[in-house]
Structures are given as C-alpha cells and as structure tokens.
Amino acid sequence: MYDWIPLTRVGKFIFNTVVQKYVDQGLLEKMPDDQDATGWQTYGVPGGSLRVHVEDNRIISIACYDECILNGYNLIGMTFDDAKNVLEIQPSEDVDIIDIGDTRQEVFEFDDLEAQLWVEKGKVVTVFCGPRFEEE
C-alpha cells in the first residue's frame, strides 16, 4: 500500500533517502535514462506503476499512478473536488495544461504539501509528491 505522509514518504520510500537501500532490497529497479525530462534518474517498483525520481542518489520525488493513500483515501481516481477536500487545502492559482498523446491533463500545485495532482476529465490520474526544499 502506498500511503502518503506529506513531505516525508510514500509507502516505504522516504524522501531524501539514498535510493540504493531500496534497490538492494529488491523494492526498486533503475528505469531507462530517457524516462524523465528533468535529468533525474528514475526507478520503478518491479511490476508496479510507482516511479521514484532521484537526484544525487537521493529520492527527490515520487509519482503515484495507481495508488496514493492519504487519510485513508486513494487520491487516484477521485474527482478533483473530492481530492481537494481530502487534502484540506486549495491549490495555487496557476494551473498548467499538459497535452499527453490525445488527452489533456490539468496540473494543480499544492505548494504547502510539495505535491502536484494531475487531473484528466475531472479525475486525479497522477500524484507527484516531494519533500520540503530548502530555499537557497
């Protein structure tokens, strides 16, 4: 189960932890380098759809595609309005529109949680989660 503790972890995967720990346990495997436009390395759960993004060997972001449990609710598949109620905060004003193949997704930022909800046809299809980043 991929329970999300905002700013801390998703499932067993703790933000800012060295990724090799999870690779050694057989929980993650390296994905092809061309998977991520940010230049981060990407790891996946064998046989699963969770993606872990890594910079300098540390977990910096986690993308949930099938399951992201918060307060007992799976955000994936929820209507956007229901997901906002579970999050208990409003997104930032700016909404990005991303065309993926034949579909269009809206990307909503929840800065206080370091999260993005990707919404297609009113339903959450992806949740990106991250740790709190220090201001430079």
Image: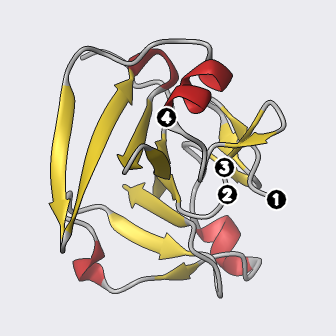
User: Mark 2 and mark 3: span between their CA atoms?
Assistant: 4 Å
Pair 4/3: label in front: 4
Q: Residue at x 66, y 49 (%)?
A: 68
**Which residue type does callout 1 highlight?**
Met
Separation of residues labelled 3 and 1 (CA atoms): 8 Å
Q: Residue furthest front?
A: 121
Q: Earlier in the sequence, mark 3 or mark 1?
A: 1
Name the residue tied to disc 4: 80
Dot 3 and dot 1 residues touching (CB under 8 Å): no
Classify mark 4: residues with Cα within 10 Å, few (<14), some (14-19) or many (20+). many
Point out which mark residue 1 bears: 1
Quadrant showing the N terminus: bottom right
Q: Amino acid at mark 3?
A: Cys
Secondary element at image label 4: helix
What residue sits right under mark 2 in the picture? 67
Residue at x 18% of width, y 74% of height: 101
Q: Nearer the viewer, residue 75 or 55?
A: 75
**In terms of secondary structure, where does tag 2 sit?**
loop
Pointers 2 and 3 in contact (CB under 8 A)? Answer: yes
- Give the foreground label among 4 and 2: 4
Q: Give the residue type at disc 4.
A: Phe
**Which disc, if any, is residue 68?**
3
Q: Quadrant of residue 6?
A: top right
- Density class for disc 2 (Cα within 10 Å; few <14, some 14-19, many ≥20) is many
Image vertical order of residue 40 relative to residue 46, above or below: above
Specify few, some or many for label 1: CA neighbours under 10 Å numbering under 14, 14-19, or 20 or more: few
- Distance between the Cα atoms at labels 1 and 2? 7 Å
